[in-house]
Image: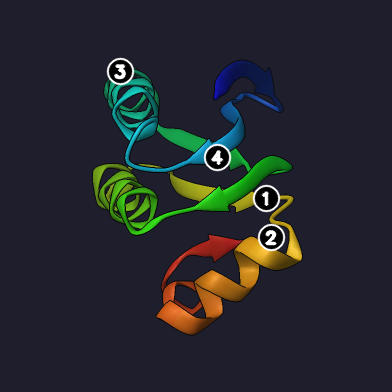
Amino acid sequence: MTINVYEENGTTVIAPEGKIDHVTVEEFENKINELGETNDALTLDMAGVEYVSSAALRAILNANDLMEGKGGLTLKNVNNKVMEIFNITGFADYLNIR
């Protein structure tokens, strides 16, 4: 997995590429925690994510909790396969997905 970070409209965007699973989730979580401490809002650009495991779902939920009370967490460019996982697990109702 590769994690790119860029700014877009004054918001920090984290753009992982590849699979977020038990092997890569620690790197993903560390990047979110690092940037979440110093930013009021974060966006996860999920365009390059082909798979999310239950460990990834936990990390995304933790990121959402971390950013709650600040500017929030937004997910964008979620592909159909990952969106189906969000729908089945109920995450689609809980997360800010655009």
Read off the residue under disc 1.
Answer: 76
- The amino acid marked with disc number 1 is Lys
Q: Which amino acid does label 2 sit on?
A: Arg
Residue that appears at 53% across and 62% down: 96
| Distance between the alpha carbons at the discs numbered 1 and 2 | 5 Å
Residue 62, image x, y percentages: 25, 49
Q: What whole-number distance in Å separates the C-alpha atoms at marks 1 and 4?
A: 16 Å
Q: Position of residue 80 (x, y in %)?
A: 74, 67
Circle 1 — which element?
Answer: strand
Residue 3 in percent (x, y) is at 55, 20
Point out the image quarter for the C terminus.
bottom right
- Measured Cα–Cα span from mark 2 to mark 4: 20 Å
Amino acid carrying label 4: it is Lys
- Name the residue beneath numbered marker 4: 19
Q: Which image quadrant for residue 91?
A: bottom left
Is there a contact, CB below 8 Å, between mark 1 and mark 2?
yes
* Dot placed on the residue nearer the N-terminal end, 2 or 4: 4
Q: In which quarter of the image is the N terminus?
A: top right
Q: Which of marks 2 and 3 is nearer the N terminus?
A: 3
SS for dot 2: loop
Q: Residue 24 carries which label?
A: none
Mark number for residue 34? 3
> In this rendering, would 81 be left or right of 60?
right
Q: Quadrant of residue 28?
A: top left
Mark closest to the chain's N terminus, 1 or 3 = 3
